[in-house]
Amino acid sequence: MKVDKPKQETATKLTQDPHSIRTEEREKVLEVAIGREVRTFRRKKEITVAELAQITGLSIGMLSKIENGNTSPSLTTLQTLANALSVPLTSFFRRFEERREAVHTKSGQGVELEREGTRANHQYNLLGHIGANASGVIVEPYLISLNAESDVFPTFQHGGIETIYMLEGKVDYRHGEEVYSLEPGDTLFFDADAPHGPEKLVKLPARYLSIISYPQNT
């Protein structure tokens, strides 16, 4: 006699919460931050990866993984690198630990300015300011469009300063440990070296201008 086997469930429940920065993501951010500092200090000493490998006894492959944020170095390894680069061990955690500034300006609350050469009926609003050296700066403007099929990704991270101006829809946008509710007319101006990105798409479609500025490498 044939016995029907119970049907197996084909649907898999999602266990990940896309609206939070998970532990492994934060660990990845730390690895990247450490790698950037190791690379920065090595270049300041004007030595190559091969030369640093010879000084520390670490392999070139391991150093490459550390600088690219692809591995989590042990404290012993970090102490070895700190000694070789003549820097405190804590300096490798500087970018991860330091406070990142952000300026959130609600619609209509910008500081109105009269600039030289202002034309009739042209109104200028200062939407935010973070002190930076403007010489040798590269600017990349983007129009970001989000729909129901768009993923949320609150852990973008790159150098420079970024300005977001909300045009349409509503988005909860993460910067570091803070989440800002952005509606049309709102501006978010922030240090882009902290983890950031849309965490929750509240009202779609959503569109916003993203202007990224960073110093040109010399």
Image (spheres, helix red, strand yellow):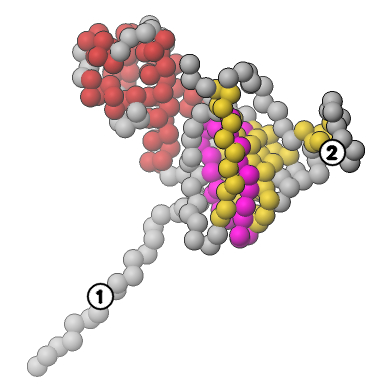
Q: In the image, residue 184 lies at what x, y percent?
A: 71, 51
Span colored in magenta: 190-213
Quadrant assignment, res 128: top right
Residue found 9% across the figure and 93% down from its top: 1
Rendered image quadrant of residue 56: top left
* Residue 55 picture quarter: top left
Q: Nearer the viewer, residue 3 or 154?
A: 154
- Tell me the mark number nearer the camera, choosing from 2 and 1: 2
The answer to whether 138 appears left or right of 73 in the picture is right
Q: Residue at x 31, y 25 (%)?
A: 66
In terms of depth relative to the viewer, which is nearer, 106 or 205?
205
In the rendered view, would you say 100 is above or below 104? Answer: above
Query: Residue 133 in the image: x percent, y percent?
Result: 63, 18
- 79 displayed left or right of 97: left
Instruction: Specify few, some or many for label 1: CA neighbours under 10 Å numbering under 14, 14-19, or 20 or more.
Output: few
Residue on which the image places disc 1 = 8
Q: Nearer the viewer, residue 8 or 173?
A: 173
Residue 207, disc: none
Relative height, residue 175 to residue 52 (above, below): below
Classify mark 2: helix, strand or loop. loop
For the image shown, how many numbered marks are present on the structure? 2
**Dominant secondary-structure state across the stretch colored magenta:** strand
| Residue occupied by mark 2 | 123
- Establish if 76 lies above or below 46: below
x and y percentages locating residue 209 in the rendered image: 63, 44
Q: Residue furthest bottom?
A: 1
Q: Is residue 49 magenta?
A: no
- Say what amino acid the circle numbered 2 marks: Gln
Q: CA distance from mark 2 to mark 1?
A: 64 Å
